[in-house]
Image: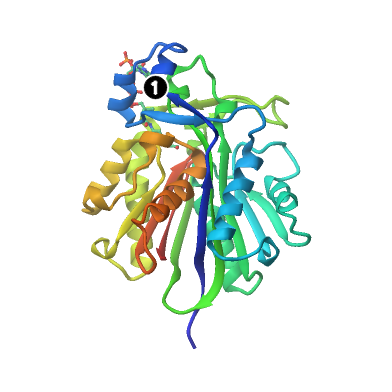
Amino acid sequence: MAERRSVILGTGSALPQREMLNAELEGIVDTSDEWIVERTGIRSRRIAGEGESTSTLATAAARRAIEAAGLDAGDIGLIIVATATPDHTFPSVGTQVQAALGVNDCVAFDVQAVCSGFLYALSVADSMIRTGAAEKALVIGAETMSRILDWEDRTTCVLFGDGAGAVVVGAETGDRGILATRLHADGRFRSMLYVDGGPSSTGTVGKVRMRGREVFRHAVVNLADVLVEVMDAAGLKPEDIDWLVPHQANMRILEGTARKLGLPREKVVVTVDRHANTSAASVPLALDTAVRDGRVKRGDLIVLEAMGGGFTWGAAVVRF
Ligand code: UT7
C-alpha cells in the first residue's frame, strides 16, 4: 500500500508595511550599512507598526496559504504556530489565528523552538497527519522580533526583522510530501542566545541577548550535520536537491552550509537581504517567496533547515 504522507498544498506569507533600511539603523546605533551588508548580507527588514502583531501577520499568511491550496478555512483541522513572540503569554497565537479565520473546532497550539520553530512545528504536524490525527493542517511561523530587541545593542538590533510564513499540509498517498524530518536540541548552550526576561522569572518580556560569534560557529557545524542526516534518512544525496530553503540568519552561514554540502549557490533560496532574520518565520517566508516567483515548482526536491536558541536545530526533506 502506498504510504500516507503530508503534502504541502499551498504556501503564503505576510510582511509588515514598514521597511527599515540599514541607513536608518545608522541613526539609532553606532553601525554602518557597510558593516551590516559585509558581515550579514542584510540590506533591509520589515518592522511591525501599530495594529500589526504576530497574530495579525500569522493570520494574513494563513489566509494566503489556504487560498493557494484551494481550500476553505473550515477544511483545517490543526493549526500550529511556531513563535517566540506571541501577542500574549497565553492564550496561544494558534487560537487567535483560529478565531480570526472563523474555524469553529480544530486543534490549535503554539510551538516554541525560536528560529527552529517552523521545523519543529512542521515535524509535529507531519507526525499527526501520518498517524491520522489530522487530515489538513496549517503550519505557521510568525514573529515580531522587533518588539523584543534592545534598540541600543548594535550586536543584535541590526540582525532581526518581522514577518510570517505559512503552509497548508494535507494527507495524500503518493510520491510527493515530507520524506524525512530530523530535530535536535542541546540546552547546554541556552545562554548563547536567549531573552533576559519572562513570565516566571522577571515577570517582564525581556530583550534578546546573543553571543553571535559562538552561535555562528555552532550553526555552520550543526546545520551541515543535520542536512547530511536528513538526506540519509530520505535515501537521497545532495546532488538530488533542487532547492535548499535555509533559515535566513546570515548570508555567510547560508553560503558556508551550501559549500559544505557541495551545493551551488544558485540552488539556495536567499531572502536574508530583504527580510533579515525573522526567526521562526524565516523558512516559510523564504519558501513562499520562491514558490510565488516561480523558482520552486511542484515535484521539486526541497530541503528546509534552521538553527536557533536553545540550541535547537532541524531539517526536513520535501518532495514539493
Ligand atoms: O537565528 C539564530 C541564529 N543566529 C545566528 O545565526 C547569528 C549568528 N551570528 C552571526 O551572524 C554573526 O556572528 C554576527 C553577524 C552576529 C556578528 O558577526 P561577526 O563577524 O561574528 O562579528 P563579531 O561579533 O566578531 O564582531 C566583530 C566586530 C566587533 O568589534 P571588535 O570587538 O572587533 O572591535 C563588534 O563590536 O564588529 C563589532 N560590531 C559591529 N560593528 C558595527 C558588532 N555589531 C556591530 C554593528 N555595527 N552592528
Please report the residue visible at 36 percent of the width from the left and 48 percent of the height from the top: 223
Residue 73 position in % (x across, y down): 67, 60
**Where's the C terminus, which quadrant?**
bottom left
The vertical placement of 243 against 21, above or below, is below
Q: Which SS class for mark 1?
A: helix
Res. 76 visible in picture: yes
Looking at the image, what colour scheme do you see?
Answer: rainbow
Q: Amino acid at mark 1?
A: Asn
Please report the residue visible at 36 percent of the width from the left and 30 percent of the height from the top: 42
Q: Which residue is mark 1?
A: 22
- Quadrant of the rendered structure where residue 302 is? bottom left
Q: Hey, which residue is sitting farthest bottom in the picture? A: 1
The vertical placement of 117 against 232, above or below, is above
Between 245 and 10, the residue placed more toward the observer is: 10
Please report the residue visible at 21 percent of the width from the left and 51 percent of the height from the top: 264
Between 183 and 294, the residue placed more toward the observer is: 294
Few, some or many residues within 10 Å of mark 1 (<14, 14–19, 20+)? many
Q: How many numbered marks does the figure carry? A: 1
Residue 151 position in % (x across, y down): 52, 18
Please report the residue visible at 57 percent of the width from the left and 59 percent of the height from the top: 67
Res. 187 visible in picture: no
- Quadrant of the rendered structure where residue 220 is? top left
Residue 140 position in % (x across, y down): 57, 51
- Quadrant of the rendered structure where residue 215 is? top left
Between 226 and 244, the residue placed more toward the observer is: 244
Query: Is residue 25 toward the left or the right of residue 109 in the image?
Result: left
Q: Dividing the image into four equal quarters, which quarter contains ligand 1?
A: top left
Residue 107 position in % (x across, y down): 71, 60
